[in-house]
Image (cartoon, grey):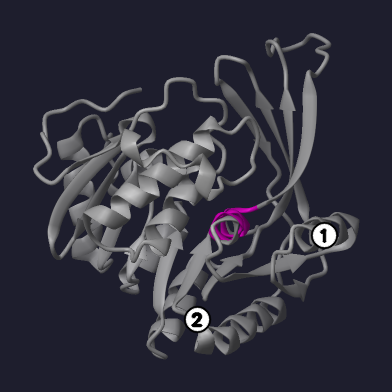
Amino acid sequence: MILTVTLNPSLDRTIEVDRLVPGEMIRARSARLDPGGKGVNVSRALLASDIASRAVITVGGADGEQLVRLLEAADIPLLTVEVGDRTRSNVTIVEPDGVVTKLNEPGGELTRAELDRIAEVVLTEAETASWVVACGSLPPGVPSGFYAELSKACAATGVRVAIDSSGPPLLAAVEAGPTLVKPNREELAEAVGRPIECVADAIEAAQELRDRGAQRVLASLGAAGAVLVDEDGVITGEAHVTAPKNTVGAGDALLAGFLAAGARGASALAEGLAWGAAAVRMPDTRMPRPEDLRRDQVHIHADPDPRRPLLI
């Protein structure tokens, strides 16, 4: 069982429009409400492929109650931690050419007592988990070292830990020596303080995170695919998508597929890329099912060209 942890979940409303024009009244072509949050998405993707997962989430207010109803209706096994502030709502606007505009609320603050309760729930459930996956942004006021604390506590029990976050929380977690970190291109550039413009840049930056403590680095690079750097070396790959519809959740699907396939080596990277590409083909934030995967469109490079530029 893979346990996911989302401190800042959300209600995600996806709205499709013909064209987004600031300052104008625009009629939506369609709208959909989904449960959101990176850890929630990882659990949804795993469960869509019959991989056992359970999601630990914070919930507060009427929006939190609605989030729980949506997840329960989707048969997502939940462990909820009640908090004082309300659950946030996010809006994603999707245009026909694949351009996505996101409006994310910051989320409510969590108290120290609430954080301690979350850690208690996670550590109790980690006893039967193969992985603990801590994902997403931290709500306002949460110490940047919380994921690092959680990683150390889980690792002490022998449970593998994956971290998917950004900024100071990611850097603090890296120092704690997690089994895996999964930054995207922007998060990787922020972590090392320089742009990522080619494969060599991504590899060098990923290795730097390993030097700081992370055991494996899976860096998602958008249309350019992904890079895996660990003790066995470097592997890159990509899955071409001719008609991308929505990139929201693609990185979460990539991580879920990678974990589902063993989280190591070319085969795991290939599976992760297939899941991520399938998510990009979805018109909204649904997670891909097995019949959505196109593994034949995945290309793996055990000897990557470091000079290859990354697509913008």
Q: Is residue 54 magenta?
A: no
Q: Give the side of residue 96 with respect to residue 105, left or right.
A: left
Tell me the kind of residue under disc 2.
Answer: Ala
Q: Give the side of residue 87 with respect to residue 204, left or right.
A: right
Image height of 165 relative to 159, above or below: above
**Figure quadrant of residue 231:** bottom left
- Secondary structure beneath dot 2 equals loop
* Location of residue 264 in the rendering, given as x and y in whole percent from the top left corner: 27, 63
Badge 2 local density, few (<14 within 10 Å), some, or many (20+)? some
- Viewer-nearest residue: 42 or 87: 42
Which residue is pictured at 62% across the width and 58% down the height? 40
| Quadrant of the rendering where the C terminus is positioned | top left
Image height of 235 relative to 195, above or below: below
* Location of residue 157 in the rendering, given as x and y in whole percent from the top left corner: 42, 91
**Figure quadrant of residue 109:** bottom right
Q: Give the side of residue 290 with respect to residue 254, left or right.
A: right
User: Which residue, given by chain and number where applicable, does mark 2 sit on?
Assistant: 129
- In the rendered image, the residue lying farthest to the front is 291
Badge 1 local density, few (<14 within 10 Å), some, or many (20+)? many
Residue 187 in sight in this render: no
Residue 228 in sight in this render: yes
User: Which residue, given by chain and number where applicable, does mark 1 sit on?
Assistant: 64
**Figure quadrant of residue 67:** bottom right
Magenta part, dominant SS:
helix
Marks 1 and 2: CB-CB under 8 Å? no
Disc assigned to residue 172: none
Tell me the kind of residue under disc 1.
Answer: Gly
- Viewer-nearest residue: 100 or 137: 100
* Location of residue 50 in the rendering, given as x and y in whole percent from the top left corner: 56, 63
Q: Give the side of residue 8 with respect to residue 240, left or right.
A: right
Residues rendered magenta in the picture:
37-46
Which residue is pictured at 83% across the width and 69% down the height? 84
